[in-house]
Amino acid sequence: MQAVIRPALPGDATAIASVGRESFTWAFGHLYEEGTLARYLEATYATAKIASSLEKPANTYFVAELDGRVRGFLKLKEACPHPSVTGPGTPWQTQKLYVDPSLLRAGLGRRLMDAGEAWMRTRGAGSTWLVVYEGNDSAIRFYETLGFRQVGVEFHDFERLRVAFKLMEKRL
Ligand SMILES: CC(C)(COP(=O)(O)OP(=O)(O)OC[C@H]1O[C@@H](n2cnc3c(N)ncnc32)[C@H](O)[C@@H]1OP(=O)(O)O)[C@@H](O)C(=O)NCCC(=O)NCCS
């Protein structure tokens, strides 16, 4: 069955949190000690946190639904400048993109990004940017395939862990 890509609804919070936890653990779990990972997931993917994030006017979420179940999501942040992103107009941030690990390479990520880019374009965004862990080869290849290019490097900390990220931009 073909996945449906649609804007998220308030009732999607639990499913988005669940996909986020599973996909994050699949992609990045090996970087964290067990306790640190649990605290990160609780801080970032508690259902109440996602529910509140869904309500913020600057955030836009899309979900990929398959057989009535949310299996991937995209989060965009409106008008979010970054000093190293020089594209025309005010860029938007592509803040989160997660697909259920059992459904990778099935086109959900591309379809979520297509929907998100169309949304940003019609709202006047000239470009979008994101950060991706520098060891996340599959996501980097995915973003390059979609036309993102690296424009910088930055470091993010969580507790004692410092991680290097590629900063990537795409003109819309
Ligand atoms: C990155 C991610 C969202 C991509 O989603 P996806 O649904 O698997 O990607 P798609 O099937 O839409 O791939 C589209 C194209 O991107 C490229 N691509 C995707 N994954 C790739 C990989 N592992 N290696 C090389 N190219 C890849 C391919 O060109 C692919 O087209 P093809 O399958 O016809 O060859 C997914 O891998 C994911 O959720 N990863 C874990 C979480 C994560 O890292 N999120 C990003 C954080 S910044």
Image (tube, rainbow, N blue to C red):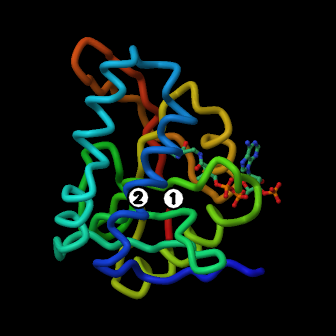
Question: Residue at 49% across / 83% down in the picture?
Answer: 6
Residue for badge 1: 170
Q: 37 above or below 104?
A: above
Q: Secondary structure beneath disc 1?
A: strand
- Does the closest atom of ligand 1 sit within 8 Å of the Cβ of label 2? no
Q: Amino acid at mark 2?
A: Thr
Of marks 1 and 2, the one in the foreground: 2
Residue 52 at x, y percent in the picture? 17, 65
Residue drawn 29% across the image and 27% down it:
156
Q: Amino acid at mark 1?
A: Lys
Residue 84 image offset from top left, x and y in percent: 32, 43
Quadrant occupied by the N terminus: bottom right
Seen from the viewer's position, the closer of residues 139 and 149 is 139
Neighbour tally class for label 2: few under 14, some 14-19, many 20 plus, Cα within 10 Å? many
Please tell me whether residue 118 is drawn above or below residue 30 in the rendered image: below
At x 72% / y 65%, what residue is drawn? Answer: 107
Q: Give the residue at mark 2.
A: 94
Q: Nearer the viewer, residue 111 or 13?
A: 13
Above or below, 143 relative to 66: above
Q: Residue furthest bottom?
A: 122
Would you place residue 150 above or below residue 49 in this image? above
Query: In this image, 167 relative to 140: left or right?
Result: left
* Residue 137 rendering spot, x and y as whole percentages: 65, 33
* Circle 2 SS class: strand
As rendered, which of 169 and 93 lies closer to the eye?
93
Residue at horizontal 44 percent and vertical 50 percent from the top? 20
Residue 129, image x, y percentages: 41, 54
Which corner quadrant of the image does residue 71 belong to?
Answer: bottom right
**Circle 1 crowding by C-alpha within 10 Å: few under 14, some 14–19, many from 20:** many
